[in-house]
Amino acid sequence: MEFASRYKCIEHYQGQFPNLPRYMIEMALDYDLENGAVSAEKAQTGSQRRKSKQVLKAQQKERQEKEDDPTGTAHILKAVASGKSVEIATVRVVPASEFKMAPMIKGTIQMDGADMNEPEPEPEENDGE
């Protein structure tokens, strides 16, 4: 059965199966369309086909690069070698010239431990006298 639009198709099946969630009907429709079911959509124009072909090639190239570098470090090494900064999840890798040391405040880990050798002065308590 062909429908004028995706919306009409979903509404038709939702009327037939009122207890079935809408997202499941949408998933079934998407599955049918991907596997060769007839669609009422317009045929793509030449430029649309070329664009989709370029996108497909780019996706295949990315997939191939990921397969060639399973650890995912190649792009990081390239970026660092070229002097660009890279963000990885919560870590940011920057060139040494751009590195800024975090301020040393109480409760942080000291890098060299030099401040640990000096005892901290304890605040004096006044009894109010």
Image (tube, rainbow, N blue to C red):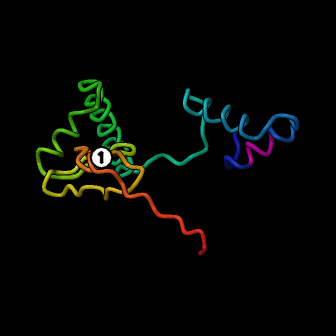
Residue situated in front as seen by the camera: 35 or 67: 67
Q: Which residues are magenta?
A: 8-12
Residue 92, horizontal then vertical, whole percent: 30, 48
Q: Residue at x 29, y 35 (%)?
A: 62
Element type at marker 1? Answer: helix
- Dot 1, how many residues are within 10 Å of its Cα: few (below 14), some (14-19), or many (20+)? few
Vertical side of 45 occupied by 78: above or below: above
Residue situated in front as seen by the camera: 35 or 63: 63
Q: Which residue is mark 1?
A: 116
- Indicate left or right for 77 with 22 as reference: left
Task: Answer whether residue 9 is magenta in the image.
Answer: yes
Residue 33, picture quadrant: top right
Q: Residue furthest front?
A: 129
Q: How many marks?
A: 1
Residue 82, horizontal then vertical, whole percent: 11, 48
Amino acid marked by disc 1: Met
Task: Answer whether residue 17 is magenta in the image.
Answer: no
Residue 4, horizontal then vertical, whole percent: 69, 49
Residue situated in front as seen by the camera: 123 or 78: 123
* Image quadrant in which the N terminus is located: top right
Q: Residue at x 13, y 51 (%)?
A: 83
Magenta highlight: main SS: helix
Residue situated in front as seen by the camera: 65 or 41: 65
* Image quadrant in which the C terminus is located: bottom right
- Indicate left or right for 7 with 114 as reference: right
Residue 101, horizontal then vertical, whole percent: 25, 55
- Indicate left or right for 66 with 16 as reference: left
Q: Residue at x 82, y 34 (%)?
A: 20
Residue 90, picture quadrant: top left
